[in-house]
Image (cartoon, rainbow, N blue to C red):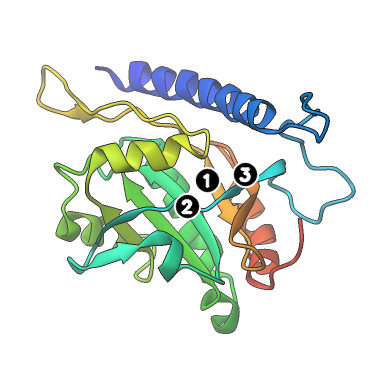
Amino acid sequence: MSRTARTARTARLAGAAALALAAALTLSACGSSGGPTAAKVTQQKDDTPYQGTKLARNFEKPDLQLTDTSGQPYDLRQQTNGKATLLFFGYTSCPDVCPTTMGDIGVAMKALSPEDRQKVNVVFVSTDPQRDTPKVLRTWLDSMGSDFIGLTGDLAKVKSAARSLGIMIEDPVVNADGTVTSTHGAQVLAFLPSDDKAHVLYMSGTEEKTYEHDLPLLAKGVAA
């Protein structure tokens, strides 16, 4: 599969995932009368200090247990409890969106004060666990942030966790040239420390300066 085809496929998936996220918000939100409410993804307006997309409904952090880059069990919900958390699903051999997204977050994290940096978790969950071993993940993540958390393990669990957030993941495909394509939604979700729920969404193509603006707010637990 050519780079152009992969990029186009990623773009299509990102768009579909955005629609799925909006649909999930609408379908899961009901008023006390039993009728649907006007829940939907809302773009940033004057009532939020964040430059990312404010969510009208806040998602629970997934109940997900995988393996971290040291080979130890990692409970996402428990071990990130009470800390601002950026969550992204992707794979290390991704040719474009994954290294770009994680690289931009890494640059923005380095701009934080040491105190604020300690208050933000960046979690990368592999969508290609067969090839993304703990060692492979650690080596790849170290080029963006040595303190970034990498998780790998049961793909069915990963897909279920992503689906609960409106993020689409397909099974990895081995191409004719031996390369692997793991098609996945490219959203980054930001969970606030106040309630451990996702309040802000960053779509594929979000600029580094947006993360640099928002990360200090997340670190301080500023409401969206």
Secondary structure, mark 1, is strand
Give the numbered dot on residue 53: none
Do tag 3 and tag 1 residues touch (Cβ < 8 Å)? Answer: yes
Can you say which quadrant of the picture contains the C terminus? Answer: bottom right
Tag 1: residue type?
Val
Regarding residue 190, the answer to whether it shows in the image is yes
Give the position of the N terminus as an image quadrant.
top left
Q: Which mark is residue 188?
A: 1
* Distance (Cα) linking label 3 and label 1: 6 Å
Q: Is residue 13 above or below residue 82?
A: above
Image quadrant of residue 89?
A: top left
Label 3 to label 2, Cα distance in Å?
10 Å
**Mark 3 Cα within 10 Å, few/some/many (few <14, many 20+)?**
many
Q: Amino acid at mark 3?
A: Leu
Q: Is residue 167 above or below residue 192?
A: above
Distance of label 1 from label 2 (alpha carbons) = 6 Å
Is the C-beta separation of discs 1 and 2 under 8 Å?
A: yes
Total number of numbered discs in the rendering: 3
Q: Position of residue 43 (x, y in %)?
A: 77, 36
Q: What is the secondary structure assignment of the residue under circle 3?
A: strand
Identified by mark 2, the residue type is: Leu
Tell me the tag on residue 87.
2
Seen from this angle, which residue lies furthest bottom?
A: 115
